[in-house]
Image (tube, rainbow, N blue to C red):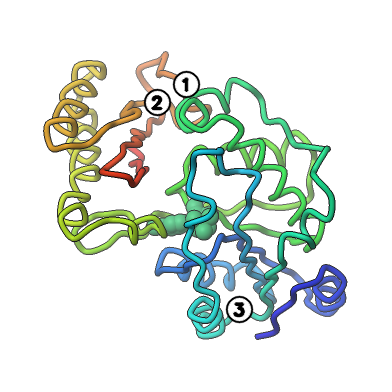
Amino acid sequence: MQVHTHIASLRAARVQAGRVALVPTMGNLHDGHVALMLEAAKHADTVIASIFVNRLQFGPAEDFDKYPRTFEADREKLATAGVAHLFAPDEATVYPQPQRYYVDPASGQTDILEGASRPGHFRGMATLVLKLFNIVAPDVALFGKKDYQQLMVLKNMVRELALPIAIVAQDTIRAADGLALSSRNGYLSATERAEAPRLYQQLTALANAVRNGASNHAELEAVALAELAHHGWQPDYLTVRRRTDLQPPQQPDEALVVLAAARLGATRLIDNIEI
Ligand code: AMP
């Protein structure tokens, strides 16, 4: 695997790469990321991964500085997963001057759920992803359903800006006890790690109830939120939404997803299940 820290080097390699799949990450890679790399290989001749912890998508009180950076271990995992090129730029390469041009996703998509809790997050994320798209010029790009709203924002960005890139969604990879794999799981104490699967359990219980015909979403959401709070969580949201735009369901036959974000101690976890 070739590691590129500069744009020119990556672009030179891209010329020979044929059909390219890009998998953007922030590093500290786990089996969820590896699943994305393996899936990417099915869609292209060449898989290009990126590792960049994007300051623009972190709020001032968020964990940018302490976000885990584990480059050597990441490099080995990517090489083992068959990734041909790793783009791992430093900040001065991606942001040689303060960024003044941004992708501003539609407010209805970014002031709800994650956007309500993390103002500016999607603007910073989408700006970086568009920049990566322009640097790499991939034919296809892969993202995890774990970050469901991110996936929606990016699909809409690609469509509305007519980018010639196919977006492929990867199902969420979980630990044996159901906890969605996340770089932030490493922040959890042993006690918190034992408690953490409750988020998935509550989402599963609610999803099953809705699948079995329950339509009292608000009541089910309140029960799940109370259960989390009772066990020491501070939930931001746990809510049934329609998959297409993450707005509250309007019609009985819409495809749904239940999404949640909650803090356990100092760690904020998110998860979701398609119903
Ligand atoms: P991150 O490094 O957290 O920015 O994630 C990079 C990509 O991996 C994003 O598209 C995430 O949605 C995806 N991802 C993160 N965790 C998982 C997981 N447990 N299963 C599948 N994809 C994931």
| SS at mark 3 in the image | loop
Say left or right for 261 vs 163: left
Seen from the viewer's position, the closer of residues 98 and 260 is 98
The x and y percentages for residue 85 are 69, 78
What label sits on residue 247 in the rendered view? 1
The x and y percentages for residue 47 are 65, 73
The residue sitting at 40% across, 26% down in the picture is 241
Say left or right for 75 vs 85: left
Q: CA distance from mark 3 to mark 1?
A: 37 Å
Say left or right for 53 vs 136: left
What label sits on residue 83 in the rendered view? 3
Snapshot quadrant of residue 15: bottom right
Kind of residue at badge 1: Gln
Label 2 belongs to which residue? Answer: 241
The residue sitting at 82% across, 38% down in the picture is 100
Q: Quadrant of the N terminus?
A: bottom right
Crowdedness near tag 2: few (<14), some (14–19) or many (≥20) residues, C-alpha within 10 Å = many
The residue sitting at 77% across, 58% down in the picture is 94
The residue sitting at 18% across, 30% down in the picture is 229
Q: CA distance from mark 1 to mark 2?
A: 5 Å
Seen from the viewer's position, the closer of residues 60 and 132 is 60
CB contact under 8 Å: marks 1 and 2? yes
How many circles with numbers are drawn on the protein? Answer: 3
Say left or right for 198 vs 27: left
The x and y percentages for residue 249 are 40, 18
Kind of residue at badge 2: Arg
Q: Is residue 166 visible?
A: yes
